[in-house]
Image: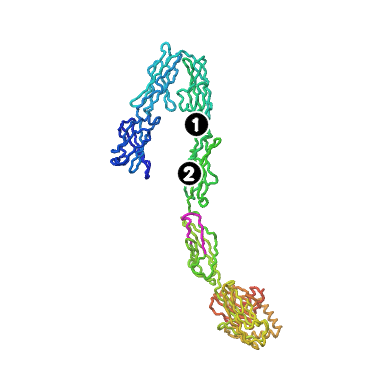
C-alpha cells in the first residue's frame, strides 16, 4: 500500500526538537515499513544497535516500532483510523523517538488517511411504521438515517428503497449536510389486501469499492384513525434575546385532535429534521408541548433556530401533525468591540509634515445594530487626529495635526479607545507608542546676550578669563558645539592674537599680559556653532574690562629737583604764621583710587614749626621763626597713593632762613629762560603794595578782559580745544589734558615767587619742564571753587599767550 512522507523542521536553534511527519493509510499490515528514520533523521544505521532506542507513543497501544539494524519504522499493530480518531476529519498519531548516548529526541507525527473500510449502518436495523389505511398518498413518514464512520467520499452518498408500488423515498439535506430520508406514500393502502409492507432501505457510500448498509422497514397498516393532530399554524416565528437563562419558556404548542380516547391523546416530539445542535439548546415537553431553553443562546453563533415538531396521537393507528417553530435571536450587547492596529510607524523625524499618516487602525464588533455601531477616539490634547476612511467605515488613519517638537515632547503614548453604542456601552483600548527623532532645528543659545568680564592688569598669559558655555536642546551631533572668536582687529592686532577660546567647552583665555595704562577694554564676539547639517549658530558679545592695579609709583614733580631728591629753599626769618613755604606735587598714572595721593612728613625737625596738608601737599609755617630755631631745617615728605599695597615717593627739602628776601628765582625753576621775567613781576608787586588805586585798576582791567576774551586757537599757543579741566584742591588752579600726541598735565602751584607751571609728558620717562609765571598773568586764584570750566580754559589760554609773550619755551 502506498504512503507518503513529509519532514518539517520547526526550529533550528541549538537543543530544539524537529518534527517529522509521515502519512499512511489505515489498516496497513503488520511489518509494513513506514519510513527509514535513520535516513530521514540523519543517523547512522549501524550505530543504532549500540545506542538505546525507545519509541514513546502517546497512546495506550503500541502500533509502531523501530528496527535498530536498518533504522526503519515499521507497523506492529494495525491501526483503525475510526478507532483512533472518531468523528475527526484529520487523524494524527504522535510519538517520540528517544536515542541514548548521546541523548536525542525526535518528534514524529504519523498521519492516518481514511480508506473505505466501513459500510453504512443504521442505528436501528428494523423500523416499524404503523400506517393507517386511511392515509392519503403523499403522506410522509420519517425514516432513520444511516451512519458511516468514514470521512470524505467514503461516507454516505445516497439512499435506495426496495421496489414498492405504495411507497417511495425522498431525501432531504439538512443545513449541516446530513441527509434525512422520508418514506412517502404514493398509493392508498388497503389493510385487507396487504396488512404489512416489508421494505428494505439501503444506504450507499461513495467509496471505491462502494459499500452499503440496510434496514428493514416494516409498514403495518392500521385501522382508520380518521383525524390526525393539527396545529393552528404550520409556521411559528418568535423573537428571543440571546443569553436567555436556562428554563425560559420559548412557546407552548397546542395541537388538537377531535378524536376520542387514545386517538386524541397527543405526544409532542422533534422530528428528525431538527438538528442536534438545536435540540441541545431547546427542550420540548412531550405532553404539554412547552418549548424551553436548556442551553446557551448566542447570536454570534446562530442568528435563528429552526425546530420541526410533530404531534402524534395514541390511536391504534396514530396520526400526527407537524409544524415548524423558528426562533429569531435578538442580539444583546455582550461582545466587546475590538481595535486592531494594522500598520504603525513608531519612529519618525520631529519635522514630519502636518497631515502625514503614522498608523492605520481597524475596529470591529461582533454584535449588530446599535450594539455593533462602534466609534474610535484618542486621548485629548495631542497633536494627532483620527481620519475615518470614506471607502471602509471601520478603518481609520492616525494623522499628524500639528507641528511636532522633540524638545517639547519626545514620546507620545496614544490611547485608542473603541466604544460601541449599546446599552450599556462596552469599550476596549489599545496604546500606540510613538518616538520622535531629533533634527537640527535649534540654534545654540548663550545664557546671556552680553558678557562683561573684568580682568586684572598684569595677568599671566594663558589665564582662564571665563567659561562661555552655550546650550543646544537638540541631540547627538546636533548638540555638539564648537566655539569661535569672530575675527576683529584693534590697532592692527587680531583678536585671536589677544584671546583664545577652547572650541569644545567655551573656556576663554588671555594670550598676553594687559596693561591698564595702555589698553582699557576690548569688545568682540564669540560664536557657538553646532555640528548638525546644516549647522546652526549664534553669537554673544564679550566686553573685556581691564582692571587697574597699583603698579605705578607716584612721581614728585614739584618742587623741581635738578639732581637727586634734595631740594634747597630759602625763606626769610620774618615770614608770618601760615605762610606757604613749599608745595609738594606728585603724579600717579594709575586710575581712580590708585592715583589718589596723600602727603605726610616722614621726618621734620620741629613739628611745631611746619604743617603739611595731606591732600594738597602745601607746607606752611605754624608760627613765626624765633631766635631759638635753627637756621637750617630739613623736611622729608612722602607722597603715598591709595592702592593696595600703597606705593610712595619721597622728597627732601632743605630750608635756609635769611634775614632779607633773596632774589633767587632760578632756584624755583630748572628751565632755561631767554630773559628774566621776574623783574617786571617785582615791579608790579611794589606798585601794587604802594598804591591801592593802581591795584584796583589792574583788578578792574583783568576782570573786563576775562569777561570779554573768547578762547581762540593760536598758532603760537597750544590749542585749548578738547581740554578737560579738573580741580584737585584750592591751591591747584587747573589740570589740562590735551589731545596732542602726548598728554599734558598742567599744575599751577602758588609760591612766594609766583605761579609755577608743571607740564608732564606721557609716556613715562620724559623730563618735566617747570616754568615760573608772574602773578600778573591774569590767572585767577583757584580757591574760587565756583569757577566754571569755560573760565578755567580762558585762563589757561591767556596763560599760554603770556608765556609766548615772555618767550618761555616748552
Q: Which mark is residue 298?
A: 1
Q: Nearer the viewer, mark 1 or mark 2?
A: 1
Where is residue 329 shown, x and y percent of the image? 51, 29
Task: Kindly state the secondary structure of the residue where label 2 is placed.
Answer: strand
| Segment colored magenta | 466-483
The picture places residue 383, in percent across and down from the top left corner, at 53, 47
Q: Which mark is residue 162?
A: none
Relative to the observer, which residue lies in front, 340 or 248?
A: 248
The answer to whether mark 1 and mark 2 are in CB contact below 8 A is no
- Image quadrant holding the N terminus, namely top left
Report the residue marked by disc 2.
Answer: 359
Q: Is residue 61 magenta?
A: no
719 displayed left or right of 481: right
* Image spot of residue 395 (x, y percent): 49, 39
Which percent across, then down, holds residue 514? 52, 70
- Residue visible at 49% across and 58% down in the picture: 537
Quote the CA–CA distance across marks 1 and 2.
34 Å
Q: Is residue 608 visible?
A: yes
Most distant residue in the top direction: 192
**Picture quarter with the C terminus:** bottom right
Q: Is residue 595 above or below residue 383?
A: below
* Nearer the observer, 67 or 367: 67
Residue 477 is a magenta residue: yes
Residue 805 left/right relative to 693: left
Amino acid at each position: 500500500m502506498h504512503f507518503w512522507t513529509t519532514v518539517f523542521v520547526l526550529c533550528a536553534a541549538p537543543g530544539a526538537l524537529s518534527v517529522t511527519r509521515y502519512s499512511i493509510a489505515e489498516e496497513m499490515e503488520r511489518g509494513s515499513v513506514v519510513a527509514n528514520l535513520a535516513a530521514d533523521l540523519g543517523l547512522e544505521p549501524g550505530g543504532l544497535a549500540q545506542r538505546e532506542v525507545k519509541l514513546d507513543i502517546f497512546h495506550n497501544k503500541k502500533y509502531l516500532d523501530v528496527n535498530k539494524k536498518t533504522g526503519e519504522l515499521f507497523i506492529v499493530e494495525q491501526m483503525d483510523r475510526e478507532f483512533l480518531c472518531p468523528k475527526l476529519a484529520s487523524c494524527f498519531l504522535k510519538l517520540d523517538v528517544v536515542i541514548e548516548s548521546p541523548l536525542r529526541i525526535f518528534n514524529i507525527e504519523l498521519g492516518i488517511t481514511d480508506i473505505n473500510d466501513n459500510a453504512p449502518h443504521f442505528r436501528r436495523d428494523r423500523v416499524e411504521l404503523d400506517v393507517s389505511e386511511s392515509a392519503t398518498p403523499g403522506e410522509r413518514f420519517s425514516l432513520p438515517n444511516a451512519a458511516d464512520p468514514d470521512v470524505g467520499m467514503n461516507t454516505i452518498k445516497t439512499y435506495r428503497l426496495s421496489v414498492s408500488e405504495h411507497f417511495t423515498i425522498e431525501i432531504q439535506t439538512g443545513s449541516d449536510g446530513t441527509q434525512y430520508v422520508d418514506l412517502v406514500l404514493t398509493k392508498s393502502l388497503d389493510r385487507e389486501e396487504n396488512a404489512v409492507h416489508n421494505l428494505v432501505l439501503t444506504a450507499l457510500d461513495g467509496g471505491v469499492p462502494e459499500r452499503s448498509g440496510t434496514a428493514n422497514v416494516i409498514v403495518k397498516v392500521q385501522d382508520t384513525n380518521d383525524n390526525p393532530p393539527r396545529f393552528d399554524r404550520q409556521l411559528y416565528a418568535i423573537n428571543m434575546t440571546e443569553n436567555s437563562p436556562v428554563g425560559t419558556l420559548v412557546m407552548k404548542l397546542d395541537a388538537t385532535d377531535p378524536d376520542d380516547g387514545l386517538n386524541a391523546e397527543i405526544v409532542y416530539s422533534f422530528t428528525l429534521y431538527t438538528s442536534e445542535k438545536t435540540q441541545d439548546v431547546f427542550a420540548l415537553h412531550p405532553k404539554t408541548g412547552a418549548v424551553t431553553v436548556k442551553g446557551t443562546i448566542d447570536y454570534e453563533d446562530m442568528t435563528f433556530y429552526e425546530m420541526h415538531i410533530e404531534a402524534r396521537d395514541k390511536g391504534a393507528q396514530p396520526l400526527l401533525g407537524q409544524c415548524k417553530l423558528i426562533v429569531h435571536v435578538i442580539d444583546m450587547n455582550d461582545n466587546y468591540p475590538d481595535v486592531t492596529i494594522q500598520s504603525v510607524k513608531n519612529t519618525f523625524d520631529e519635522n514630519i509634515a502636518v497631515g502625514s499618516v503614522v498608523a492605520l487602525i481597524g475596529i470591529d464588533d461582533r454584535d449588530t445594530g446599535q450594539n455593533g455601531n462602534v466609534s474610535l477616539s484618542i486621548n485629548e490634547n495631542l497633536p494627532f487626529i483620527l481620519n475615518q476612511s470614506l471607502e471602509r467605515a471601520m478603518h481609520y488613519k492616525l494623522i499628524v495635526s500639528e507641528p511636532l517638537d522633540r524638545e517639547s515632547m519626545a514620546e507620545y503614548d496614544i490611547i485608542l479607545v473603541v466604544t460601541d453604542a449599546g446599552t450599556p456601552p462596552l469599550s476596549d483600548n489599545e496604546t500606540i507608542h510613538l518616538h520622535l527623532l531629533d533634527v537640527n532645528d535649534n540654534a545654540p543659545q548663550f545664557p546671556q546676550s552680553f558678557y562683561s568680564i573684568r580682568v586684572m592688569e598684569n595677568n599671566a598669559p594663558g589665564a582662564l578669563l571665563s567659561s562661555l558655555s552655550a546650550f543646544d536642546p537638540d541631540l547627538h551631533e546636533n548638540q555638539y558645539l564648537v566655539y569661535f572668536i569672530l575675527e576683529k582687529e584693534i590697532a592692527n592686532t587680531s583678536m585671536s592674537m589677544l584671546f583664545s577660546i577652547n572650541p569644545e567647552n567655551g573656556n576663554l583665555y588671555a594670550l598676553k599680559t594687559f596693561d591698564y595704562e595702555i589698553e582699557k577694554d576690548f569688545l568682540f564676539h564669540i560664536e557657538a556653532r553646532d555640528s548638525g547639517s546644516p549647522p546652526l549658530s549664534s553669537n554673544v558679545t564679550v566686553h573685556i574690562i581691564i582692571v587697574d592695579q597699583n603698579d605705578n609709583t607716584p612721581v614728585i614733580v614739584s618742587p623741581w629737583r635738578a639732581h637727586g631728591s634734595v631740594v634747597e629753599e630759602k625763606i626769610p626769618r620774618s615770614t608770618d604764621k601760615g605762610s606757604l613755604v613749599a608745595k609738594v606735587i606728585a603724579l600717579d598714572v594709575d586710575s581712580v583710587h590708585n592715583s589718589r595721593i596723600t602727603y605726610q612728613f616722614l621726618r621734620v625737625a620741629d613739628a611745631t614749626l611746619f604743617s603739611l596738608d595731606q591732600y594738597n601737599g602745601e607746607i606752611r609755617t605754624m608760627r613765626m621763626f624765633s631766635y631759638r630755631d635753627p637756621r637750617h631745617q630739613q623736611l622729608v615728605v612722602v607722597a603715598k597713593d591709595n592702592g593696595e599695597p600703597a606705593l610712595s615717593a619721597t622728597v627732601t627739602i632743605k630750608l635756609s632762613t635769611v634775614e632779607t628776601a633773596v632774589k633767587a628765582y632760578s632756584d624755583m625753576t630748572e628751565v632755561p629762560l631767554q630773559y628774566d621775567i621776574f623783574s617786571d613781576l617785582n615791579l608790579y608787586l611794589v606798585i601794587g603794595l604802594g598804591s591801592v588805586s593802581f591795584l584796583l585798576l589792574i583788578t578792574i582791567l583783568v576782570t573786563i578782559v576775562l569777561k570779554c576774551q573768547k578762547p581762540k586757537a593760536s598758532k603760537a599757543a597750544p590749542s585749548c580745544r578738547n581740554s578737560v579741566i579738573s580741580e584737585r584742591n584750592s591751591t591747584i588752579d587747573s589740570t589740562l589734558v590735551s589731545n596732542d600726541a602726548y598728554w599734558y598735565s598742567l599744575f599751577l602751584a602758588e609760591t612766594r615767587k609766583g605761579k609755577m607751571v608743571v607740564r608732564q609728558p606721557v609716556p613715562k620717562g620724559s623730563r618735566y619742564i617747570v616754568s615760573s609765571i608772574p602773578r600778573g598773568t591774569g590767572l585767577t586764584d583757584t580757591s574760587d571753587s565756583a569757577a566754571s570750566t569755560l573760565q578755567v580754559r580762558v585762563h589757561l589760554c591767556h596763560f599760554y599767550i603770556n608765556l609766548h609773550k615772555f618767550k618761555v619755551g616748552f
